Image: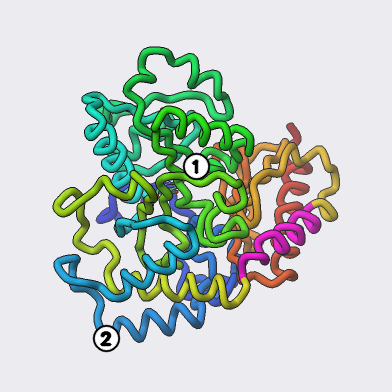
């Protein structure tokens, strides 16, 4: 459905609901109806709505100082950098405002890395099914042909290979000489919650090290507690050279980060990159509150606990187990692939007061907040089962 307000470009197919406020895992529409949030603003409000720590930090900071620009030192930006460094082992980082911008910073960083090695036509290996954002650089790195179409000429220098297929890289032949980096999402989010195999990621790490390529992890969606650790790489025993995040870091305040270690941390110097807003005091106050709550409130273990409750409730309520073809992902990044059509799932969910989303065309992407109660997780799981049971009854395949 295009936007009903003609003053807005109709780039989104919006659902017919407007929210007025939220509390924890529940959003309330303008008529006062409650909805259980299984989307978290697309993996953003990982701490739920109106989180006391984030609300207090943001309101206090808003009354003190919102923005200064990076012409000056920003104490809160330094604080976020220290906290992220401590959590990830990354040496330094660049602050921006979104996931796409974090990817843009990584693309520039990788190109500079190649330039310093005398590679005039640097190439980055990216994967089929990947999503890295909508700006021209990030879009060029994105695998979905449908969203790239009509926006050419796109940025050159990306070599696309199938996911989980190491020989596909080895067999590239000549272009390998100009490769500077491999960029992947450890779980492809927009592509349909498709995890990359752990041994594939380990082999990619070895391959990058052996060839002096940078390994870049796009953890814009997998990060900030969603998968049960601050960043998913911690659970994979694979350490990237460049780590990108955004989304949940600000719990709704726009912030993105491109983190780097080792040689990757030495590529961008004064004047090489910038952002007027990037890492401003207001967004960084939110990020400090998010990182503090994730740790001090011991929220990350909740990801697996709530996942378990949700999936168990789903399985208990589903009338026919063959209605679920697959369940993927980790922690609270859950992909439920039904064997039914996915066309009416979001609408039926909405009618039942559940906020759901479809990714990759055939998968229900469930991204609830980490602060959800076990009861709410169960309610979401059984609610999804009710939707699938209803579809099986009313829309037989
Ligand atoms: C893995 C990944 N990278 C990048 C992006 C782009 O982030 P943004 O929409 O903040 O530009 C997204 C957004 O869904 C994402 O999931």
The percent coordinates of residue 82 (x first, y second) are 39, 68
Q: Residue 123 vs residue 313: left or right?
A: left
Determine the residue positioned at 37% across, 50% down.
260
Q: Quadrant of residue 372?
A: bottom right
Sequence-wise, which precedes: disc 2 or disc 1? 2
Determine the residue positioned at 25% across, 77% down.
66
The percent coordinates of residue 10 (x first, y second) are 33, 47
Q: Is residue 310 magenta?
A: yes
Residue at the disc numbered 2: 64
Q: Is ligand 1 less than 8 Å from the beta carbon at label 1?
A: yes
The percent coordinates of residue 85 (x first, y second) are 42, 62
Q: Quadrant of residue 377?
A: bottom right
Highlighted range, magenta:
299-314
Position above or below: 387 against 143: below
Q: Is residue 288 magenta?
A: no
Secondary structure under the numbered disc 1 in the rendered image: loop
Q: Residue 223 vs residue 362: left or right?
A: left
Residue at the disc numbered 1: 185
Q: How many residues crowd mark 1 within 10 Å: few (<14), some (14–19), many (20+)?
A: many
């Amino acid at each position: 459905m295009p936007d009903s307000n003609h003053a807005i470009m109709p780039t989104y197919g919006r659902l017919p609901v407007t929210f007025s406020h939220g509390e924890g895992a529940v959003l309330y529409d303008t008529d006062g109806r409650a909805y259980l949030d299984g989307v978290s603003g697309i993996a953003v409000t990982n701490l739920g709505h109106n989180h006391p720590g984030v609300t207090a930090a943001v309101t206090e900071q808003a009354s003190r100082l919102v923005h200064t620009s990076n012409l000056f030192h920003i104490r809160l930006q330094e604080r976020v950098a220290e906290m992220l460094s401590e959590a990830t082992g990354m040496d330094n980082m660049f602050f921006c405002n979104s996931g796409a911008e974090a990817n843009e910073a990584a693309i520039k960083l990788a190109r500079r890395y190649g330039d310093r090695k005398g590679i005039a036509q640097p190439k980055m290996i990216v994967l089929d099914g990947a999503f890295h954002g909508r700006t021209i650089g990030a879009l060029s790195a994105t695998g979905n042909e449908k969203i790239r179409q009509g926006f050419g000429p796109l940025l050159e220098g990306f070599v696309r290979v199938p996911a989980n297929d190491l020989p596909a890289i080895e067999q590239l032949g000549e272009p390998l000489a100009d490769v500077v980096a491999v960029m992947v999402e450890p779980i492809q989010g927009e592509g349909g919650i498709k995890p990359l195999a752990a041994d594939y990621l380990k082999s990619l790490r070895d391959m990058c090290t052996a060839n002096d390529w940078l390994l870049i992890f796009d953890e814009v969606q997998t990060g900030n507690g969603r998968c049960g650790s601050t960043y998913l790489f911690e659970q994979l025993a694979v350490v990237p050279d460049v780590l990108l995040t955004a989304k949940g870091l600000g719990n709704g305040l726009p912030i993105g980060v491109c983190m780097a270690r080792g040689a990757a941390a030495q590529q961008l110097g004064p004047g090489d990159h910038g952002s007027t807003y990037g890492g401003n005091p207001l967004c960084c106050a939110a990020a400090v509150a998010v990182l503090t709550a994730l740790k001090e409130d011991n929220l990350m273990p909740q990801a697996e606990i709530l996942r378990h409750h949700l999936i168990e409730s789903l399985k208990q309520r589903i009338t026919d187990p063959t209605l679920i073809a697959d369940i993927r992902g980790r922690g609270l990044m859950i992909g439920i692939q039904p064997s039914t059509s996915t066309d009416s799932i979001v609408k039926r969910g909405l009618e039942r007061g559940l906020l759901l989303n479809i990714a990759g065309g055939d998968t229900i992407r469930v991204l609830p907040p980490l602060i959800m109660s076990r009861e709410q997780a169960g309610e979401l799981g059984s609610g999804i089962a009710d939707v699938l049971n209803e579809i099986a009854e009313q829309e037989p395949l």
